Amino acid sequence: MENYSIVIFIMALMILLSAVADKIRLPYPVLLITAGIGIGFIPALPNIELNPEVVFLLFLPPLLYDAAFNISPEEFRTNFNTIGTLAIGLVFLTAAAIAVVAHYLIPGMTWPLAFVLGAILSATDAVAAMSITKGLGLSHKTITILEGESLINDASALVTYHFAIMAVTGTAFVFWKASFEFIVLMAGGIFLGALMAKMLGVLLRMLRKNDMVVISLMLLMPFVTYLLAEEIHVSGVIAVVVLGLRMGRLSGQVFPEKLKQQSGAIWDIIIFLLNGLIFILIGLQFPYVIKNIPSNLIWPYIGYGFLITLVALLLRMGRVFSQQLNLDQAFKKGKGRITENALLDFKNSLIISWSGMRGIVSLAIAIGLPMTVESDSRNAIIFISVVVVLITLIGQGISLPWIVKAVKLPPADKKAQH
């Protein structure tokens, strides 16, 4: 009963702070994270630890499904070159770069452990970026790239983490075998997501006159799809994304307007509550993880967190702006399927670069580190991961809206609200 009361208190506080943030024009994720840190230091409060399994089952499926359902299929296809570059290539590149920094700078950080840290912090969290920039007038292109990246990069990061953990636990790493497993995970997720979407489409056509049953099925299916995918060892993230993309396309054909409005209102409330809880939970973790770190190592570890954040940010900026040049050259030479709509300009490239925040997935992966990992190394990795997540969400969270306003997006872009 005590934990139940705490959850109700946190949800009520989250709703209140979201309203306050709107009034004072502060990005609500920043205010919620700060409040979470403050609440975590209250002595009488029971230890509220983040359960990675709860995050992956309760938070991830609905957030991924909602983003995939609402994304424009045409914009997604047009910008898939950029999305793939950021969600796959940049994830692996970032993991490697962070591993190099961690190995050579952090005492006792072996190569396997360094790659674990790199994998944990390799994927960005577009949920945070979209929450912070909502209403600022980003173009459809920028929104699609950020959301499209977040739909795929979690799968890339989880696969990278899986192989890094294998190295830490002494399992032999074979490149061709790892590549094959990656392809199986991704392909299996795509197939399962498409199959579940097909089954759901048939059910919805049969039950389309029963609004409550239809909406309930739509709410339940992302969780069922994710669980089933994990059970058969394919990518649950990709399965849910494919389900959302297919159902978003089908909704225009199957659902009457009234049902769309009802379903949309329910999903808006669910996503609002989940997002708010995520940001408070992120803040709550800092006071708990700091207890496991010797006092003389706290500031050095915070310094490593700042340095890793800087390396990841510079690497992302370099990759985004090089992608801008690559697209320009490919378009001029008529290579591939690059259209004019896929090209990036300086303003949108800067916004995309600065939106590389880390979030709940990085935190859940870190806290879910196997207990077999040596305790001091495990605590160091978790603490540094939390520091990087907080730096990116608070630092970039405060500055991103300012950057969006400073670049003065053209009126055509400002019409694109999400």
Image (cartoon, grey):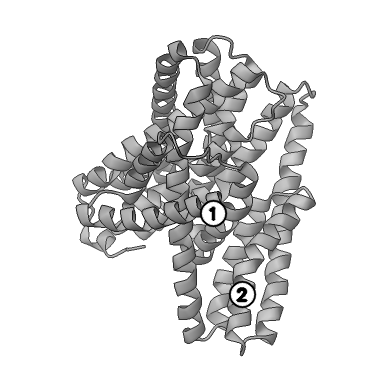
Q: Which mark is residue 95?
A: none
* Vertical relation: 360 (above or below) 189: above
**In which quadrant is the C terminus drawn?**
bottom left
Judge the density around disc 1: few (<14), some (14-19), many (≥20) Cα neighbours within 10 Å: few
Q: Is residue 210 left or right of residue 277?
A: right
The residue lying at 71 percent from left, 79 percent from top is 202
The residue lying at 36 percent from left, 46 percent from top is 32
Q: Residue 282: tell me if it is visible.
A: yes
412 or 148: nearer the eye?
148
Give the x, y percent position of residue 232.
80, 51
Q: Which of disc 1 and disc 2 is earlier in sequence?
A: 1
Q: Disc 1 on helix, strand or loop?
A: helix
Q: Disc 2 on helix, strand or loop?
A: helix
Judge the density around disc 2: few (<14), some (14-19), many (≥20) Cα neighbours within 10 Å: few
213 or 66: nearer the eye?
213
Give the x, y percent position of residue 96.
56, 25
Marks 2 and 1 sit apart, C-alpha to C-alpha, by 25 Å
Residue identifier under label 2: 216
Give the x, y percent position of residue 19.
29, 58
Q: In front: mark 2 or mark 1?
A: 1
Tag 2: amino acid = Ser
Tag 1: amino acid = Tyr
Q: How many marks?
A: 2
The residue lying at 48 percent from left, 79 percent from top is 262
Q: Is residue 70 left or right of residue 398?
A: right
Q: Residue 325: tell me if it is visible.
A: no
Residue identifier under label 1: 4
